[in-house]
Image (cartoon, grey):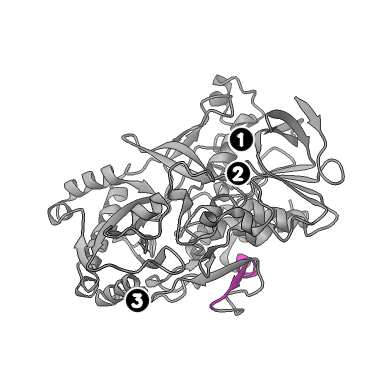
């Protein structure tokens, strides 16, 4: 194994692992300080120009992550329930999963920040973080006001509701009495409205584009692609670098600090491989224990999702700009979490999303329905000291009566919406489940279990909280408990997934931790 000092001025001040939603934002913000050298490592390709991304990665009407075997993803084998194996994609490209996802860019809810600030302190309060949310965005619909920004790297535009299917969705929501929610980033009452997105004029503007392309020329920023980090080197309680596999060679890259932005799967797995995690589990694998942190990997949080398809009454035009239509948020019957049920509209058939096509004549369209109540219950367990061996990932869905009830409620709400007179102007009806299944709890539970998917909102695998709490692994700025010079800055630090998809929150984490590091906050 070779040992090299990398970066424009010898050993970099900071090595950032992963150029996704959080890592791109963090590396870009850190490198705005010309006195700080930053090395950003990405396991996938690193295009240097917009056109090098390829048309299928830029077309916002497609979702590359939905296409099995796509070159820009890494696939993980997981279990959503003990009897439901599943394959989950993660972006392996500059921009990470923002390069292959749907472009949904909705802020977390105030109640999410209340939960996070209960363990992360006032730093994580909504009012404290609103200025950062404004600073990271360029809202093309609202411009600059008390809630929105117009100068940030991430361009945000809400979906156009003029497509016939979106117009029918709006009419159906009105028929059922749901309130309008014209700005889902404004913390108003949940309801029906367009979806804020980082897809603009038909182009998916991932974080590699929005944060890094303009920063690549900075002399203090080095971005290395095809660089797979194998472990963090920790000596005498301090991170001093990483081991990287690149071009078939294993090498040590030394650094002043290391920040893991490898995502909800990658960051806990790297910590385990580096000796940070539950002692007994690591010792069984022959991994020397460096820091006893049983919370690493122990409490995976995500949202279960289902696809409900309906048949259009007539051939509908393919969407002009994005696969996303509108979104409806409503509350489950227990009233514990306002707006925890999501009905998200696809204007491209599922067969098109999976096959990489924007139109499939004669195919049904779909609603993606999910329960986004905060929950834990999953786990990530490293099963081998070999970095190439995937960890065991269990989501723990459908484990409680509440899990099953909420899924029944969102399925039935979607079926009711499709059955409205207004939606019938565009639809011949729901394909499945049928009326008999919808009317029987046990039958519907069985249908859900056999059709279950996930929203790909993984959080909680390296949760933040006080150092004396065994349920936490990092502090409010991602500093790993008990190890100097090592941080985690991605959605794995959120103790629970937010009530909305976490892409915008992932960028926020990169901004927050980057600013804390520049200000040398502990």
Along the viewing direction, whichever of 123 and 3 lies nearer the viewer: 3
**CA gap, disc 1 and disc 2:** 8 Å
Does 130 lie within the magenta span?
Answer: yes
Which residue position holds label 3?
Answer: 179
Please provide the residue range marked out in magenta: 129-141
Q: Left of 132 or right of it: where is 520? A: right
Give the label on residue 270, or none.
1
Q: Earlier in the sequence, mark 1 or mark 3?
A: 3
Along the viewing direction, whichever of 450 and 378 lies nearer the viewer: 450
Asked if marks 2 and 3 touch (Cβ < 8 Å), the reply is no
Q: Left of 360 or right of it: where is 262? A: right
Q: Which of marks 1 and 2 is nearer the N terminus?
A: 2
Q: Tell me where residue 152 sits by quadrant.
A: bottom right
Element type where label 2 sits in the image? loop
Residue at the spot 43% in from the left edge and 76% down from the top edge: 182
Asked if marks 1 and 2 touch (Cβ < 8 Å), the reply is yes
Residue at the spot 48% in from the left edge and 63% down from the top edge: 111
Residue projecting furthest to the left: 436
Which numbered disc, 2 or 3, marks the residue closer to the eye? 2
> Where residue 305 sits: x, y (%)?
36, 51
> Where residue 133 sits: x, y (%)?
60, 67
> Where residue 108 sits: x, y (%)?
50, 62
Which residue position holds label 2?
Answer: 262
**Mark 3 crowdedness (10 Å alpha carbons): few <14, some 14-19, many ≥20:** some
Q: Does residue 215 sit above or below 146 in this rendering? A: above
Q: Is residue 263 visible?
A: yes
Q: Does residue 373 sit above or below 279 in this rendering? A: below
Q: Which of marks 2 and 3 is nearer the N terminus?
A: 3
């Amino acid at each position: 194994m070779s040992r090299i000092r990398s970066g424009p001025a010898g050993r970099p001040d900071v090595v950032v692992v992963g150029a996704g939603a959080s890592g791109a934002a963090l590396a870009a913000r850190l490198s705005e300080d010309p006195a700080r050298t930053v090395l950003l490592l990405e396991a996938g390709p690193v295009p240097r120009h917009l056109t090098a991304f390829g048309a299928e990665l830029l077309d916002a009407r497609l979702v590359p992550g939905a296409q099995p075997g796509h070159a820009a993803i890494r696939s993980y084998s997981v279990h959503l329930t003990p009897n439901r194996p599943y394959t989950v994609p993660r972006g392996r490209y500059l921009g990470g999963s923002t390069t292959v996802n749907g472009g949904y860019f909705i802020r977390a809810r105030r109640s999410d920040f209340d939960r996070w600030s209960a363990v992360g302190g006032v730093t994580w309060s909504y009012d404290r973080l609103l200025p950062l949310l404004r600073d990271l965005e360029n809202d093309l619909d609202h411009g600059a006001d008390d809630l929105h920004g117009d100068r940030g790297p991430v361009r945000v535009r809400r979906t156009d509701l003029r497509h016939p299917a979106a117009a029918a969705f709006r009419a159906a929501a009105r028929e059922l009495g749901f309130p309008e929610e014209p700005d889902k980033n404004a913390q108003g009452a949940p309801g029906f409205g367009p979806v804020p997105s980082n897809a603009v004029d038909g182009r998916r503007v991932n974080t590699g584009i929005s944060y890094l392309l303009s920063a690549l020329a900075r002399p203090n920023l080095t971005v290395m692609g095809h660089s797979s980090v194998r472990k963090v080197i920790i000596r005498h309680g301090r991170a001093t670098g990483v081991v990287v596999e690149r071009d078939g060679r294993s090498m040590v890259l030394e650094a002043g600090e290391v920040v893991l932005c490898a995502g909800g799967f990658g960051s806990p797995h790297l910590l385990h491989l580096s000796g940070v995690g539950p002692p007994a589990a690591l010792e069984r694998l022959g991994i020397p224990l460096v820091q006893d942190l049983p919370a690493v990997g122990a409490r995976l949080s995500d949202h279960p999702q289902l696809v409900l398809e309906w048949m259009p009454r007539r051939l509908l035009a393919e969407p002009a700009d994005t696969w996303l239509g509108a979104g409806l948020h409503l509350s489950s019957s227990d009233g514990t979490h306002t707006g925890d049920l999501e009905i998200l509209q696809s204007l491209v058939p599922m067969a098109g999303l999976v096959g990489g096509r924007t139109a499939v004549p004669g195919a049904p369209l779909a609603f993606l329905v999910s329960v986004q109540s905060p929950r834990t219950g999953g786990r990530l367990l490293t099963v081998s000291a070999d970095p190439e061996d995937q960890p065991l990932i269990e989501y723990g869905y459908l484990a409680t009566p509440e899990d099953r009830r909420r899924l029944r409620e969102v399925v039935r709400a979607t079926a009711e919406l499709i059955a409205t007179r207004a939606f019938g102007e565009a639809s011949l009806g729901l394909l499945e489940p049928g009326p008999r299944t919808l009317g029987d709890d046990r039958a519907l539970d069985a249908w859900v279990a056999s059709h279950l998917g996930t929203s790909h909102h993984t959080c909680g695998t390296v949760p933040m909280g006080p150092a004396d709490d065994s349920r936490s692994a990092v502090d409010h700025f991602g500093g790993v408990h008990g190890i100097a010079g090592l941080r985690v800055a991605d959605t794995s630090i959120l103790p629970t997934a937010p009530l909305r998809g976490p892409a915008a929150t992932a960028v926020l984490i990169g901004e927050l931790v980057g600013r804390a590091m520049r200000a040398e906050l502990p």
